[in-house]
Image: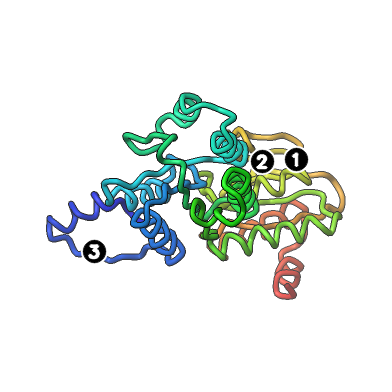
Amino acid sequence: FGVTHTALNRLQQRKCEIVDTTCGSVLTVWKRVEYYAQNGFTTIIHGKYPHEETIAVCSQISKYPAAKYLVIKNATEGMSIADFIGGNISKKEILRQFTGRYTTGFNPENDLQKIGFANQTTMLGGESRQIAEIVREAFAARYGEEQTERHFRSFDTVCSATQDRQDAVRDLLAAGDLDMMMIIGGFNSSNTAQLMQIASESVSSFHIQDPGDLISKQEIRHQTFPAMKVRITDNWLPDGAVKIGITAGASTPTRKIGQVLYRLFELKNIPAHQIKRIVNAT
């Protein structure tokens, strides 16, 4: 996810050996927000403010003393920005609604006249594009279509691996014949939570971390959405044949996915030799 530039500077000052493994998709976001900062655009970031990636992105903007940012979490908050641009809500309301998620000294009246849009790479791609369009349309309504580019810039920075998984889940759900979805990944994983959000809108879904969460045919340990609470649910696995769609977060090891598959077959009392034949055929 990257690190804040202040933390990196401290490590460099201490002569630490640094191996930079920042994701290339994250570096693309950094380059984009630096462009905004250098050209007088306030960056609006679609992301989760406590997330390490968003904190690091904000830090890249803060390298430029005059630059500003604002973090929004969903399309509803995007509508608030559009309402302010259109003169429908006050500066005071914007500052109240986004307390703690903007640069020190942020002034909506000055700093929301030119906006550059970016997103945390693991957010829902469709929602990010929706927010960008909401804000763009607000500027077009206020200044006219021909002046919109002077006030608004956007660049889709959703990670391709994240987008591919979101698209694959939608394809699975579109078939309409699943009994449930199993989403595998860390409970603190943003991109896994987005997969859970997509799946849970259409079918009974369970977000688990590993095969150990499949306690028995009667009990499953999982994280709920949108409450994000870990709980144990009873009687989760129906008797008889059941069709389960399986997906996993971008950083979930393939080995772990295989282990979950084996555990599901075990719970359905499928013999080991049949499990191997089924897995080898997929």
Q: Residue at x 37, y 62 (%)?
A: 22
Mark 3: amino acid:
Ile
Outermost left residue:
14
Above or below, comparing residue 91 to residue 176 in the picture: above
Kindly identify which residue carries mark 3. 18
**Secondary element type, mark 2:** strand
**Secondary element type, mark 1:** loop
Depth check: 101 or 116 in front? 116
Q: How many marks?
A: 3
**Residues at marks 2 and 3, CA–CA distance in whole angstroms:** 41 Å
Mark 2: amino acid:
Ile
Depth check: 205 or 38 in front? 38
**Secondary element type, mark 3:** loop
Depth check: 10 or 277 in front? 10
The quadrant of the rendering that contains the N terminus is bottom left
Q: Earlier in the sequence, mark 2 or mark 3?
A: 3
Q: Measured from the top left, where is residue 240 in percent x and y?
A: 87, 50
Q: Are marks 2 and 1 in contact (CB under 8 Å)?
A: yes
Kindly identify which residue carries mark 2. 220
- Relative horizontal placement of residue 87, taking residue 178 as reference (left or right): left
Q: Measured from the top left, where is residue 215 in percent x and y?
A: 64, 43
Residue 236, labelled with which disc? Answer: 1
Q: Earlier in the sequence, mark 2 or mark 1?
A: 2
Above or below, comparing residue 92 to residue 198 in the picture: above
